[in-house]
Amino acid sequence: MDFVEMLLTNAPAFIFVLARTGSILLLFPFYRFVFMPIRVKLGLVGIIALTLVPLVGSVPMPAGLLELAVGLGREILIGFTIGLVTNFIFTGVEFAGHIMGYQMGLAMANVYDPLNNSQISILGRLTGLLAMLVFLGANGHLLIIMTIKKSFDLIPPYGFHLTESLGDGVLTISREIFIIGIRLSAPVMAVVFFLNLTLGILSKAVPQLNMFVVGFAIIIAAGFVVLLLTLPAMQGAMEKSFEGMWQSLYGLLRVM
């Protein structure tokens, strides 16, 4: 009975917390990656929202439906921004896998991605799974809940403002997709480039050899060897990228 009374008393706070939490988690890569029934996902959103309601404090009920709709729209925009920024890092890591797969000659070896309803390269899928493991190993699933709580400290309900600095900040962070992709795929790209150059020279020196057949297998094998050797460095680069992601998120929250 006490729980029901608490929920009724803090109904406005629960509505706003639920809107922001739901929009963040439904766009969050880890939350979308886990294959579970939609009812379970909605239940988890509700549990997290109920946990955060006492920490947010009291929220006044809007005077009319228009104010309520505007307030909820602002909460959804906050959640969309946070979820979008977290997607940039994972997209950059998958982009690195796409580049490596294309350079190694695996561009046609694609698998179906049910999350985005599209085709994705095998290496893109592999690097995406690796990024998810690194994220969980760094307690990212707990940090995102802390970020939601921090967002209410910096931006209380009705406190969101769409500023020019916010748009500039999102565009600046979006550059990480290409920076991370090139940085992680650089070793494989360099090795494949020199192999192609060497095979090209050999094909001119020894025309009898079928360099297309031989080189295809050599490039794929060399690419996987380089990828295996650079996995520790990739892990460190991903961890730094996630650390920068949290700092960028807090910076965006301050300008909202």
Image: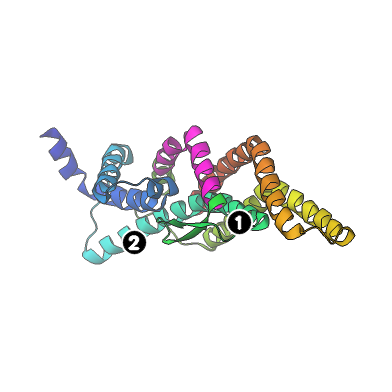
Dot 2 and dot 1 residues touching (CB under 8 Å): no
What amino acid is at disc 1?
A: Leu
Q: Position of residue 242 (x, y in %)?
A: 55, 42
Between disc 2 and disc 1, the foreground one is 1
Q: Residue furthest bottom?
A: 66
- Left or right, 97 with respect to 150, comes to right
Residue on which disc 1 sits? 106
* Alpha-carbon span between mark 2 and mark 1: 43 Å
Question: In terms of secondary structure, where does tag 1 sit?
Answer: loop
Instruction: Indicate which disc residue 121 carries.
Output: none
Instruction: Indicate which disc residue 73 carries.
Output: 2
Q: Position of residue 170 (x, y in %)?
A: 54, 58
Quadrant of the rendering where the N terminus is positioned = top left
Local crowd size for mark 2, using a 10 Å CA cut-off: few (<14), some (14–19), many (≥20): some
Q: Position of residue 147 (x, y in %)?
A: 44, 42
Q: Residue furthest right?
A: 205
Question: In terms of secondary structure, where does tag 2 sit?
Answer: helix
Q: Residue furthest front?
A: 208
Indicate whether residue 47 is drawn in magenta: no
What amino acid is at disc 2?
A: Gly
Local crowd size for mark 1, using a 10 Å CA cut-off: few (<14), some (14–19), many (≥20): some
- Left or right, 34 with respect to 183, comes to left
Judge by depth and name the residue closer to the eye, 14 or 124.
124
Q: Position of residue 185 (x, y in %)?
A: 67, 50
- Left or right, 107 with respect to 65, comes to right
Residue at x 50% of width, y 33% of height: 137
Highlighted magenta segment, given as a residue range: 124-148
Majority secondary structure of the magenta segment?
helix
- Quarter of the image for residue 4 reads top left
The vertical placement of 40 against 207, above or below, is above
